[in-house]
Image: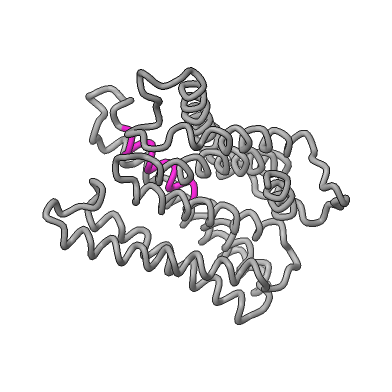
Amino acid sequence: MLRTIMCALRRVMAPDRPIDKNCSMTPRNSVSSVLLAIAAAFLPSVALADTLQAGPGDPVWMHLGANALLWAHIGGGAIGMVTGVVALAVRKGQRVHRAAGAVFFMAMVVAYAIGAGVAPFLESGQRPNFIAGIMALYLLISGAMAARRRDAKAGAPEVIGLIIALSITAAGVILMQMGSASSSGTVDGSPPQAFFLFTIAGAFAAAGELHVLVRRQLSNVSRIARHLWRMCFSLFIASGSFFLGQQQVFPEALRDSVLLYALALSPLPVMLFWLGKVRFDDWRRRRV
């Protein structure tokens, strides 16, 4: 099963590279294989826990498994956010950008897969986190595919993406209704307004998949725009989860401060800037 997953990931990240019948792994992919194997092996060890921690009376292997998942999740998220900022800051298409993007992809796959995979097993409500993890993974993988598949035509990946995007949109609508009808006014501690994000992002992603399926093949500008907004929005999910969802790790003076909100939302204006630049540069080239 793990070999199948890694072969699929390799085809996404490097479709132009030959793959033998045994789908041999490069050193870079081997790192991802080890991390994903650890996550898959220890997922059952945290089942029915309130947080990603083993209980006091649980055996040692459960504590080790929970700690491995926790630190892989934290480490993947931290490395992903740092390399994501680097990828946004440097010149696009150059070696540094490609290297930072590759590390960002692998680190975030680990972080999001653990977050989405563990959430259903926790006793405390984690439905928003589960959907956020699935959405982040979907945007991350489809964004990476947009960068790599330069001459690819629409096909099964876009159909699967459309199904996922529509499911995310529907989940957002359902959770908004559940939150509004709940006596607490929330779903698993999250207000209905929070699920508006799922609805908007899911609908926008679904429209993008439909656009690809109808056109059958994207122009270079549309492909780059697809890559940009999906990777940036995936980074925004991580920054929002950290700076707003984990405020207890910051000094009390910073909690609920404008600074944390600015850091959480920062990928969005950067995304808008690069999208505008891509469109403007294309318009300027066509006028020459």
Residue 200 located left or right of residue 28: left
Residue at the spot x=44%, y=42% of the render?
A: 238
Residue 17 located left or right of residue 115: right
Quadrant in the rendering for residue 144: bottom right
Task: Check the image and report above or below for 201 versus 90.
Answer: below
Query: Where are the magenta residues, as a range?
Result: 234-246
Q: How is the image coloured?
A: one colour
Residue 31 located left or right of residue 264: right
Q: Position of residue 188 (x, y in %)?
A: 26, 48
Res 167 visible: yes
Q: Position of residue 105 (x, y in %)?
A: 61, 44
Q: Is residue 241 magenta?
A: yes
Q: Is residue 172 magenta?
A: no
Q: Residue furthest left?
A: 183
Residue at the spot x=60%, y=81% of the render?
A: 214
Q: Nearer the viewer, residue 42 or 105?
A: 42
